[in-house]
Image (tube, rainbow, N blue to C red):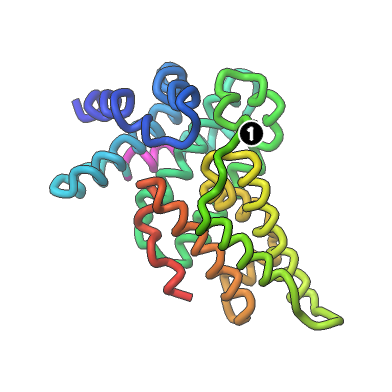
Amino acid sequence: MHDLELMHHFTAHAYLTLPGTEFTKQVWGYAVPQEGFKFPFLMHSILAFSANHLAYISPSKASHFRLLSSTHQTAAVTSLNKALADIGPANCHAIFVGASLTVMNAFADARVYDLDVLIETFQLIRGMDYVLGKATPMIEKGPFAPIIRPSTDPPKPSPLLSTFLVEIQASCYGGSEDPTPSERARIKATEVLRQSLQYSFETSPHPALRASMIWPISIETEFMDMLKARTDPDVRALFKLYCKLLEFTATDFWFFVGWRGISDLL
């Protein structure tokens, strides 16, 4: 009965909170659940997302729905990992939307909202992207292509977000004339953050969300290690900028609300 309640809520309400145009939302609300009946990992991802949304809108029952979400998320990740080992034309579309929901669920229901868990979520995003990258041409021609298709006429970004891009641009400059390898990695990661947001302004109706997903998959492994250590003040300053970007995302999407104030930890 719980699963029926969760599926009903997803197809009636929760899918409307997902990013994208109205047409894209219809894909989420109708085509994705139909695919979920064929692939258990996708069904678990859908039900976990629905449970997380119910926990968000029903605080008095949050613990109940969080438990349901955690159960489905664990099952989704386990079965998704198995499916990733044999990705192909038959399952790549389900894997793509299942992985997307799994990432959103990881942000929505983190065990704690701190920097170490955020980096763990980066690693989840990077792992999913690595495998899905091989299937991108198939996904772009499949039933869920509207979800990843760049927008041809995105709305003008908010003044606050435009000002934030200027702040990132300012941090791209400076440094020594003969930078160390660590300094070069940090400078490159800063430029990647700038490029991610600029690109998202041009291609997405939700630029903060798009950029907050692009940056973790685009930075180098060496810089990921620097983020884990967080001993370099300049690295901490850049990480703080990313966390501010995540906070912009939290103003638009409920599944990032728990990350409000994360920049204060740096």
Is 29 or 101 nearer to us in this picture? 29
Instruction: Give residue 79's position: percent from left, percent from top.
Output: 47, 34
x then y, percent, for residue 237: 58, 75
Residue 37 quadrant: top left
What residue lies at 30% left-to-right and 29% top-to-bottom?
13
Left or right of residue 220: residue 82:
left
Residue type of the residue flagged with mark 1: Pro
Furthest-left residue in this view:
60
The residue beneath circle 1 is 150
Q: Is residue 221 magenta?
A: no
Q: Residue at x 18, y 43 (%)?
A: 58
Please tell me whether residue 136 is drawn above or below residue 199 in the rendered image: above
Range of magenta residues: 70-76
Residue under the point 67% across and 59% down: 194
Q: Which quadrant of the view contains residue 227?
A: bottom right
| Circle 1 Cα neighbour tier, 10 Å, few/some/many (<14 / 14–19 / ≥20) | some
The image position of residue 214, as x and y in percent, is 62, 49
Whether residue 125 can be seen here: no
- Please indicate, yes or no, whether residue 34 appears anywhere in the rendered image: yes
